[in-house]
Image (cartoon, helix red, strand yellow):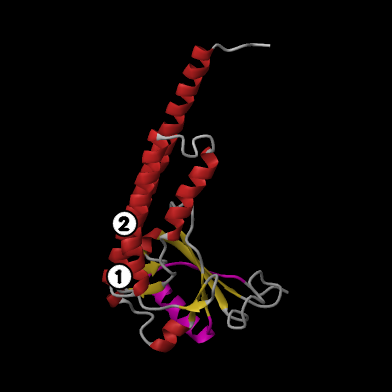
Amino acid sequence: MVKYSKGEFLKDKGKLRILTNLLFTVIFLFSVIYLIRYRLNLKKAAEISKDALYPLNKSEFASLLLPVEWKEMTPLTKHTKSYQYVKWGTVVALFILAVLLALVFTTEFLGSSFFSLAYLFYLIISLVRHQGNLYILPKGIIFNGKYYMASEIHHYETEQIVRWHELYGYHSRVDNGYKLTFDIKRKIFQPDYIIVEDSSLLQQITALLDQQGIKGVHKKEPI
C-alpha cells in the first residue's frame, strides 16, 4: 500500500485545485460569451421584426404555438416583458456567475463537486431565455430570437401532427396542426420547432420561404 506524506498530499491537492479553477474559468468565459451573444441577437431581432412579412395581424400571431406550454406567439419588441426579462436577466446572471467563480477561487464552496457547480452554471444561463418566435422577413427569418439570412438556412421541414405523431395528444390545438423546423447550416445545435395551427397559414409561410429560395421538406403523414 502506497503512503503519501502530508507534503505530497497537499501538493496533489493544490494541483487539483488549480485544475478545477482553470476548468471553471473556461466554463465561466463560455457562459459570458453565450449570454452576451444571446442578448445581442435578441436585440437585433427586436429591431428588425418591424420589417416582417409574416406574422402581421392577431390571427397570424395566434396561429403560432410555442413548445412546450403551447402558448400563442406574442410580438417581439424592446418594450415587452419577455424582452426586458432577458435584458435585465442577463445582467443578473453575469453577476451571479462572477460571484460563483469568485467563491470557487477563494473558498472550498462546492470544490469537491465539479459536476454540481457546472450544472449550476448551466441552470443559470438556461433561465435567461426569451420565449420562442418566428418572423418571415424579406431576406431571412427571425427564429427563437435570432436572425438568420436565407443563405444560412439549409432547408425547412413541415410535418402534420396526426395520430401516432410524437406530439399528438399533448394539446388539443397541437393535434392536426403542423410542426415547422429549420435546418441551419454549420450549426451543431439546431433551434427548436414551432407549431402552425392552420394549414392555410402554413401555406402562406412556406410560400414566403420558397420565394427566398429556401428549400422545403414536407413529411408525409404516418400510415
Q: Is residue 129 magenta?
A: no
As measured in the structure, the alpha-carbon distance from the residue carrying label 1 to the one carrying label 2 is 18 Å
Mark 1 surroundings within 10 Å by alpha-carbon count, few (fewer than 14), some (14 through 19), many (20 or more): many
Secondary element type, mark 2:
helix
Left or right: residue 135 compared with residue 2: left
Secondary element type, mark 1:
helix
Q: Taking 83 as reference, is 126 above or below it?
A: above
Q: Which disc number belongs to residue 46?
A: 1
Q: Is residue 218 magenta?
A: yes
- Judge by depth and name the residue closer to the eye, 177 or 36: 36
Q: Which residue is mark 2?
A: 91
Q: Are marks 1 and 2 in contact (CB under 8 Å)?
A: no
Which residue lies at the image location 70% right of the left edge and 77% below the top edge?
Answer: 163
Q: Position of residue 212 (x, y in %)?
A: 37, 70
Which residue lies at the image location 44% right of the left edge and 60% below the top edge?
Answer: 127
Q: Taking 42 as reference, is 62 above or below it?
A: below
Q: Position of residue 6 (x, y in %)?
A: 52, 14
Residue type at mark 2 is: Val
Q: Earlier in the sequence, mark 1 or mark 2?
A: 1
Q: Is residue 185 visible in the rendered structure shown here?
A: no
Q: Taking 25 as reference, is 68 above or below it?
A: below
- Judge by depth and name the residue closer to the eye, 94 or 53: 94
The magenta span reads 197-219
Q: Position of residue 188 (x, y in %)?
A: 48, 51
Mark 2 surroundings within 10 Å by alpha-carbon count, few (fewer than 14), some (14 through 19), many (20 or more): some
